[in-house]
Image (tube, helix red, strand yellow):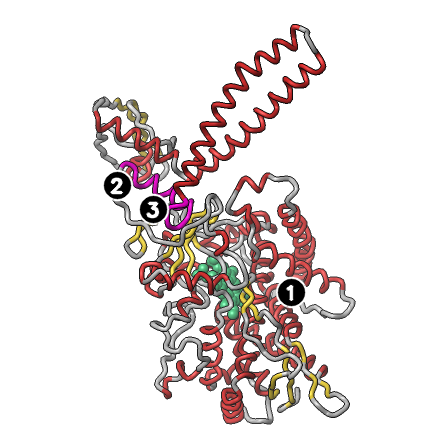
Amino acid sequence: MIARWTFHDGDRMADHRAAHLNLPLVDRLPIFISKGDVRLYDDGACINHLHLTFHKAVGVTSIVKRVQETLSYLATPKAYSTLVQVNVITLLSAAFIIFTSIIAQEFLRDTALAQFIVQASTWTSFRTSSIILVATLSMMVIMIVGSWFDKGGPAWSVARLSMRWPFKAIHTPNGPRGWPILGTWWLMQGSNMHRDLAKHAWGGGDSTRKLMALSVGVTRIVLSSDPKVAKQILQSQVFGDRPLKQAASDLGFARAIGFAVQGPYWRHLRKIAVMHMFSHKQIVSNYESLQRETSRMISAIACDLSTDEVGTRVGLCLRPYLQRAAVNNITTTVFGRHYSFGSSCREATALEGMIREGFELLGGFNSADHLPLLRHLPFLPFASRCRNLTRQVRTFVQPILDEHRRRCRQGDSSVSSFVDVLLSLQGDQKLLDDDMISVLWEMVFRGTDTVAVLIEWALAEVILNPKIQAQIHKELDTVVGQTRLVQQKDIDQLPYLQAVLKETLRSHPPGPLLSWARIANEDTQVAGYHVPQGTTAMVNMWAITHDPTVWPNPNTFDPSRFMKNEGGDDIDVLGTDLRLAPFGSGRRVCPGRALGLATAQLWLARLLHQFSWSQDPDHPIQLTDNLKMSCEMALPLHACAMVRIPEL
Ligand code: HEM
């Protein structure tokens, strides 16, 4: 490669090196250099080494440009948080100096040393720190007051200030006004966050429906509630990374598929996931264990069914059955192991505890993700909880890896679980143990609650709509009959059951905000708005699936909208059609979607084939959301069941 480049006066070296010459970045500061040391590389080898001298034309344009660059830097969130830190340090130093002079006066009294300390602190350090303090406080007050008047909250105000200086017209998205420093904090948490965000997006008209600006502390966010704009975000390479939350980072998830940054390592993991862990062959080979776990769940439910003294059926809380089956389903797939929950099995209890703790840490709102200074406060237990969990997970998973290795050495080369898949990788495909633990543990987190939550919602809707239940029973009896159990191969012949599941995914997407957000890795345009690098991008899938302009009568549970023979649209839910993309879309689409869907279809089919369900009069069903890591029913589903087809 022979690269030619004419440097113009005032050009930024760093940009040219990165953009045109493929040269290593030496400095990223927005400064203009007058002398340059340029090396040209071809395939890593230095082929030319030039010393260039630039002659700066000192004119009005270059001075304005220089001021503009400096102010742009000052108005970035990074500079803003530096300002806050300077302020805190200044306050502490001032307090320290006052304290020292008081002590000196008190203990050294009229000695020469005391007089020196008092004078020095009064006239030098104290004054200097006071000036810094007043200056930083005034800047903060100006920024805080300014941000109060700006749409989208303070993080957006800071970004706009940086982008628009001096007087550039940049089109940025609109959004609700935020509190100083905190921004629209109140909108970004709570069990109904997806609904609140949808109300704001719809309330602001077409522009905020397409793209709404929000701020939480220093985090600048854009949120889309429109299928076309959502597609633009999710399928773009620019939004191919995720913001690394403190929990994800402390739990080692930066080395797992969900949070690894786009690059050779992430591509390697995705390839392993697509080709080995979630390949059609692997999913088919899991059918047997899936059937076994489903049978165990159904037997447990059947075993606990009872009637009271007058023969009325007693209701069951279904959540524990679904959750435990989901954990076992995923642990047999991932580790090749089944756990006996509810017994005195210590491993099962530990596993349940770790999963619960992981959900709380990863699914909860952590202020330190948005105000990084808080991470340094020693009395917040978040970091130590993450460290404890990481230790526990390692202690739990490492022996499983070791045991699989031992079996392998003894000649057992069967590949039946994800652990086997990862251990069977050879050469440069091999992963380190710690990386394997992160990958496997992420699968356990992601694969566990989603399916259980989905089936709980599906059963609740079916029980509330007896006609729908009757139609599923009719379809099942026609296709499967009453003399055998549902098999995986029957699912294709059950279009109505599939439509019920799709309608559940539409009405109650398990990840209404697609769970984990994306981040812009460079400045870009979305829906005609400028979105700066580092902006967190979210999609409100719940808002899309409840938008009457996208789905007529969105609040009615109507599976026929997916039945072709009833005039419906049998759309693909795996990420191609953004009107219903509960598994996300693009390069970060859920790799476990086929497995998750196959599990949910079999569970629903078998639960409805083998039981007839009705409301528990003591616990009327309420369709209220509770958004945690996934969006579950706020009140767990209680229902009465009558056996239609016993476990064979
Ligand atoms: C009903 C079941 C499921 C639903 C609704 C669901 C939903 C999602 C969603 C919305 C995302 C984010 C996609 C995006 O950013 O575009 C995701 C990512 C992910 N899911 Fe699932 N999921 C399900 C089941 C599973 C299962 C069973 C597994 C694994 C065993 C799994 C593993 C993952 C992983 C590893 C990611 C991160 C992918 C990446 O960032 O590259 N999911 N899932």
Inter-mark Cα distance, 2 to 3:
16 Å
Give 307 or 472, whichever is nearer the viewer.
307
Q: Amino acid at mark 2?
A: Lys
Task: Locate residue 297, reporting x and y percent.
Answer: 65, 78
Judging from the image, what secondary structure is the residue with disc 3 in? loop
Residue at (45% x, 73% y) in the render: 506
The magenta segment: 148-166
Magenta: main secondary structure: helix
Task: Locate residue 71, reporting x and y percent.
Answer: 35, 33
Quarter of the image where the N terminus is located: top left
Residue 320 disc label: none
Residue at (66% x, 57% y) in the render: 397
Give 168 or 125, whichever is nearer the viewer.
125
Residue 412 disc label: 1
Residue 523 disc label: 3
Q: Nearer the viewer, mark 2 or mark 3?
A: 2
Judging from the image, what secondary structure is the residue with disc 1 in? loop
Res 272 visible:
no
| Residue 160 among magenta residues | yes
Task: Locate residue 473, reporting x and y percent.
Answer: 53, 90
Q: Amino acid at mark 3?
A: Asp
Label 1: few (<14), some or many (≥20) within 10 Å?
few
Q: Nearer the viewer, mark 2 or mark 1?
A: 2
Q: Amino acid at mark 1?
A: Asp
Q: Does label 2 or label 1 sit earlier along the sequence?
A: 2
Q: Does label 2 or label 3 sit earlier along the sequence?
A: 2
